[in-house]
Image: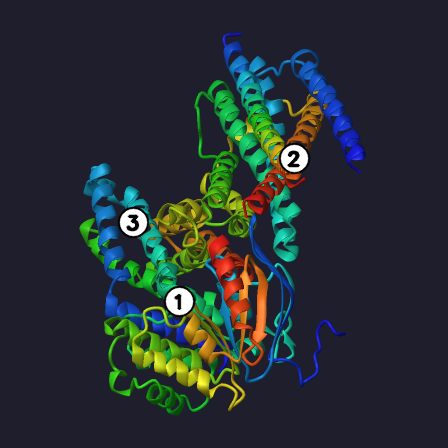
């Protein structure tokens, strides 16, 4: 069992590495420079991949939070927690790379566009998720509260998106490509998303494993000290 | 081409943060490893003590 | 006794306690007024810009006031372990949520109904705006639905006074945005159709959160 | 089948393989216990032995990690509302609202329990606890002993068949102590089963039909009043309190 898990882990790691190298090659060598925005447009590939994968991460947290509340199996909680952690790291990167790109493309660091605002709210919500787990008076409570925030926060996302969309009707996002997305661009994007998805899976599995290990060690310690 | 700096900044940040996160996990793993060793030692000493 | 009667029982208990202690409404009222005053200075509001910033100031005041009030919702039950007393009762946990929700909704409404005319007077805006009442009602319901749930979460954490705003504020962003825009429509005396979208967003938010909170409240309070 | 349905002539309380852990900390590590109808069970044990956790599970405030509990033959997982009606709990705290009067508090809880003829019932429990002349005093203004009596009144309102007393004597005046004697004395007669957690050895031994010592989440000693081996009891008790 352990051996097989190791094998899968190594295979994933190899796959991730290969994909990441391919992604970097495609972003910097293969894909042609977009005409209107120039070289900076290449930020787009990682930026969008990170955004997608962080959304996936929060979806996983949502699903596993529900599973945890139904069955109360700690392993579901480890996955939900680890996934939220990776999601927060990735969203942080989205929120950093976004403005860098925006500054050159639109001449502004930030705009209260639907996507940007939703990412920011999402980030704040999952910071709250991590905080509520950290500040809960008992770990079991933290897991329950985390699950509740993981569910409630995720349901908020479409409502926030919709609201902000109506609120600010002008969309900077529509002018990403003047000529529409070309085939090489799409290919590059797909490879980038695949690379980050594998990275996400690796990090989440590792994080969940660490949490499980941490719990067993704490239990052992308590048993030994009485 | 003056924007090359921005491109460079964006990608460096991505790698720095991901690397930092992996490092953080690695340190956590090392800490847990040490704790396991401590527990093993204390178990071992107790067994020899019991004998 | 029916479920509804029990919700009313909890609600009436909260009203009675509040009438005796006058802790929540008074403090929230004073706090919200202070927020209004500070924001007016911060934006150095003049009468000609009032219409632009007024909705924002009003809802900032009511949102922050709401946080202060919802901190109280379950803090009261935590004292003397009263929540355990409630949990012993042979009722569905959702009944406890709805009972507490009824109370916090009422307190939010009372504060908003007192604050709004004062606020409108301070900015020399028309006082009689019945449509605003609808906006306040829908927004208060959304606030109370989320606030009551997170209040029950926050009381069982360390640093609970900080936990509630951290949890509450990101989630109620849609309500705040919608309430501000709808209020702007009312203040500018535009037509119903201009505020319809915002009312719909608030109604959708209220329904979603009432349903979801009812479902998950059990997991918040049950050990 | 045997998991859920128990014969109507079953124990008042039956606990099987009960465990509970709060995160990393195991509070109960496998409790088996039967309490007969009308029995008065007294639970001793050092701090952190799991006494309060056990009482909270029996009163359905805390859900078990594993194991089963039947109250009057009903599994507590199956019919929570029905089981909750059977239980009266007097905890460390009163569960009462300081700003409401004794009467208002009792009325609130009667309505929550859906008690028929509630005015009459409130009158009954108030006179039993000698609270009638304080009925319109706010609970916050009462002495600790009186508050505890009001708490007993609250717990008795819905005529529970199982009364759980978690260290009810902490800070109680002598008069209230006699009320507890009264509760304990009444047990058995009208089929009331009482489980009491206490640190007071003398009173516990005097009031209980049977006693249990909990230690580190397990039953360390169990005996009925008739065949209790006092020296062994003391020995186990002292051992627990020393190591605990």
Which residue: 25% across, 82% down?
D136
In the rendered structure, are the residues bearing label 2 and label 3 in contact, judged by CB atoms less than 8 Å apart? Answer: no
- Chain that bears disc 3: C
Label of residue C61 in the image: 3
Q: Residue C28, percent across and down?
A: 27, 56
**Taking D101 as reference, is D243 left or right?**
right
Is C76 in front, or is A197? C76
Helix, strand or loop at mark 1:
loop
Numbered disc in front, either 2 or 1: 2
User: SS class of the residue under badge 3?
Assistant: helix
- Which chain is home to disc 2? B
Quarter-of-image position of residue D36: bottom right
Q: Quadrant of residue A20?
A: top right
Q: Nearer the viewer, residue D60 or C14?
A: D60
For the residue pair A93 and D224, the one nearer the viewer reads as D224
Discs 2, 1 touching: Cβ within 8 Å = no
Q: Mark 1 points at which residue?
A: D92
- Say above or below: A160 vs B4: below
Please give the residue where the numbered disc 2 appears in the rendered image: B44
Disc 1: which chain? D
Foreground: disc 2 or disc 3 = 2
């Amino acid at each position: 069992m352990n051996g097989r898990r190791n094998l899968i882990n190594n295979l994933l790691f190899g796959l991730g590495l290969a994909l990441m190298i391919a992604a970097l090659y495609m972003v910097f060598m293969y894909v042609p420079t977009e005409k209107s925005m120039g070289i900076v447009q290449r930020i787009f590939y990682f930026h969008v991949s990170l955004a997608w994968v962080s959304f996936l991460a929060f979806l996983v947290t949502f699903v596993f939070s529900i599973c945890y509340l139904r069955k109360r199996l700690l392993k579901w909680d480890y996955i939900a927690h680890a996934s939220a952690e990776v999601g927060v790291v990735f969203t942080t990167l989205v929120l950093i790379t976004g403005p860098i790109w925006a500054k050159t493309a639109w001449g502004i660091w930030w705009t209260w566009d639907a996507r940007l605002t939703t990412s920011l709210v999402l980030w704040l919500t999952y910071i709250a998720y991590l905080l509520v787990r950290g500040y809960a008076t008992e770990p079991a409570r933290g897991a329950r509260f985390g699950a509740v925030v993981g569910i409630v926060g995720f349901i908020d996302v479409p409502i926030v998106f919709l609201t902000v969309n109506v609120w600010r009707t002008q969309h900077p996002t529509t002018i990403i490509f003047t000529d529409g997305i070309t085939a090489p661009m799409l290919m590059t994007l797909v490879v980038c998303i695949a690379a980050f998805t594998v990275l996400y899976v690796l990090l989440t599995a590792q994080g969940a494993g660490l949490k499980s290990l941490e719990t067993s060690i704490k239990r052992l310690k308590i048993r030994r000290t009485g | 081409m003056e924007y090359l700096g921005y491109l460079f900044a964006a990608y460096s940040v991505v790698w720095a943060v991901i690397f930092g996160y992996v490092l953080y996990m690695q340190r956590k793993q090392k800490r847990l490893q040490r704790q396991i060793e401590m527990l093993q030692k204390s178990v071992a000493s107790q067994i020899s003590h019991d004998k | 006794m029916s479920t509804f009667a029990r919700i009313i029982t909890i609600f009436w208990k909260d009203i009675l306690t509040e009438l005796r202690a006058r802790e929540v409404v008074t403090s929230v009222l004073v706090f919200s007024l202070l927020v209004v005053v500070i924001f007016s200075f911060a934006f150095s509001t003049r009468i000609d810009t009032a219409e632009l910033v007024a909705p924002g100031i009003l809802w900032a005041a009511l949102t922050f006031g709401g946080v202060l009030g919802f901190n109280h919702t379950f803090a009261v039950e935590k004292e003397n372990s009263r929540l355990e007393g409630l949990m012993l009762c042979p009722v569905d946990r959702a009944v406890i949520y709805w009972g507490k929700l009824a109370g916090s909704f009422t307190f939010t409404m009372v504060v908003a109904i007192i604050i709004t005319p004062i606020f409108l007077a301070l900015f020399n805006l028309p006082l009689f705006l019945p449509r605003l009442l609808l906006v306040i009602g829908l927004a208060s319901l959304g606030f109370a639905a989320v606030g009551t749930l997170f209040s029950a979460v926050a009381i069982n954490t360390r640093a609970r006074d900080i936990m509630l705003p951290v949890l509450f504020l990101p989630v109620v962003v849609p309500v705040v945005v919608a309430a501000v825009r709808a209020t702007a429509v009312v203040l500018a005396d535009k037509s119903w159709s201009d505020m319809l979208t915002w009312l719909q967003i608030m109604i959708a938010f209220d329904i979603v959160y009432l349903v979801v909170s009812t479902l998950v409240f059990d997991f918040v309070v049950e050990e | 089948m045997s998991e859920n349905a128990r014969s109507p002539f079953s124990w008042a309380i039956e606990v099987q393989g009960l465990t509970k852990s709060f995160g990393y900390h195991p509070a109960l590590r496998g409790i088996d216990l039967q309490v007969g109808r009308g029995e008065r069970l007294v639970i001793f044990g050092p701090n952190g032995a799991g006494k309060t956790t056990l009482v909270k599970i029996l009163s359905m405030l805390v859900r078990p990690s594993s194991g089963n509990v039947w109250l009057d033959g009903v599994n507590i997982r199956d019919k929570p509302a029905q089981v909750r009606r059977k239980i009266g709990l007097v905890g460390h705290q009163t569960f009462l609202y300081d700003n409401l009067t004794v009467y208002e508090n009792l009325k609130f809880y009667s309505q929550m329990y859906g008690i028929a003829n509630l005015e009459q019932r409130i009158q009954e429990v108030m006179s039993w606890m000698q609270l009638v002349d304080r009925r319109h005093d706010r609970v916050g203004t009462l002495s600790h002993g009186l508050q505890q009596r009001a708490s007993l009144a609250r717990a008795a309102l819905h005529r529970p068949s199982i009364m759980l007393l978690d260290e009810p004597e902490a800070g109680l005046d002598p008069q209230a102590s006699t009320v507890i004697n009264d509760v304990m004395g009444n047990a058995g007669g009208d089929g009331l089963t009482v489980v009491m957690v206490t640190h007071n050895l003398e009173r516990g031994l005097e009031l209980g039909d049977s006693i249990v010592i909990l230690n580190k989440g397990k039953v360390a000693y169990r005996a009925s009043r008739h065949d209790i081996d006092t020296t062994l009891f003391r020995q186990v008790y002292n051992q627990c309190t020393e190591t605990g």
